[in-house]
Image (cartoon, rainbow, N blue to C red):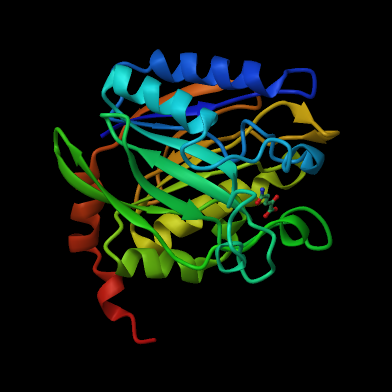
Amino acid sequence: MRVHVLQLAYDDDEPVAARVERAAALVSGQRDADLVVLPELWAPTGMNYDLWTAHAESVDGPTVAAVAEAAKAIGAYVHAGSIVETAGPDAPPEARGPQGRGLWNTSVLIGPEGDTLATYRKVHRFGFASGEPQLMEAGEQLVTADLDLPDGRVRIGLATCYDIRFPEQFRRLLDAGAEVFVVPAAWPARRVAHWTLLGRARAVENQCTVVQCNTAGTHAGVAMGGHSQVVDGTGVVLAEAGDGEEVLVVDVDLDVTRRWRADFPVLADRRL
Ligand SMILES: NC(=O)CCC(=O)C(=O)O
């Protein structure tokens, strides 16, 4: 499985519309990819909370549409990262979430025909007394999706950024049949050591490949961590990005992890 991880860098000066155009063009250039991955909230920014409401959109809005067109052009699966999803001004109360905000941090998986295959609303909201917990609803469902690739079918499990700190989510994705976890992020530089460590931990403890796509650059005064990485189920870091904008192109041999699960069947010893 050839994975292209698009570690986008951006700052406060770039208009959102320009970034959407730039990112879609970058996706269009990934012609030999099986799966392309974009970061969390790359369009409305991961940390400039003041932009979120103004740039909230539905999952068939302009950002996803632009990425979907690029996905169709290259005939690849594209994890479009996440958007600020809005329920829309006319949504009834029951469609706006328990706190009535009608906003979610929603990632979108697009198929090679440009069709939306899955959406995942981030379960664990980051920010404590600000940001997602104050502005957004929490997702309530875990999501997996099957990719039909040249070397066979693989089930991926979806998680977003802060979710990676909660191992129970990944165990449940494992139990739902996931072999690969795809994790877009807007993870700051000051905690990037946690980002890379947690990715390796989720890979080793679940014997799953972990594809992590972070943000680079500085926006809203926050230096983002970069260091996107792909870790196979044996814990080997197949590739790791640096601090700037970068595309990781990684050939993931899923059989390596499948053989490891057979050779070291630790998961069969689970008792809880
Ligand atoms: N966007 C995020 O979820 C950031 C998470 C983070 O910075 C952390 O867990 O540390």
The image quadrant that residue 266 belongs to is: bottom left
Q: Nearer the viewer, residue 10 or 57?
A: 57
Horizontal relation, residue 62 to residue 157: left or right: right
Residue 104 at x, y = what percent?
Answer: 60, 53
Question: What's the residue at 72%, 19% (across, down)?
Answer: 15
Numbered disc total: 0
The residue located at (74%, 56%) in the rendering is 135
Quadrant including the C terminus:
bottom left
Residue 23 visible at all: yes
User: Image check: 220 left or right of 244?
Assistant: right
Which of the 4 quarters of the picture holds residue 192? top right
Point out the image quarter for the N terminus: top left
In the figure, 12 relative to 142: above or below?
above
Residue farthest toward the bottom in the current orientation of the protein: 271
How far across and how far down the image is residue 256, in percent? 23, 46
Query: Is 167 or 267 nearer to us in this picture?
Result: 167
Q: Nearer the viewer, residue 113 or 76?
A: 113
Q: Does residue 240 appear in the picture of this structure?
A: no
Q: Residue 71's spot in the image, x, y percent?
A: 35, 25
Q: Determine the residue positioned at 24% across, 39% down.
A: 253
Image point (20%, 53%), residue name: 258
Whole-percent x, y for residue 87 in the image: 58, 52
Question: From the viewer's perspective, is 270 left or right of 59?
Answer: left
Observer-nearest of 171 and 58: 58
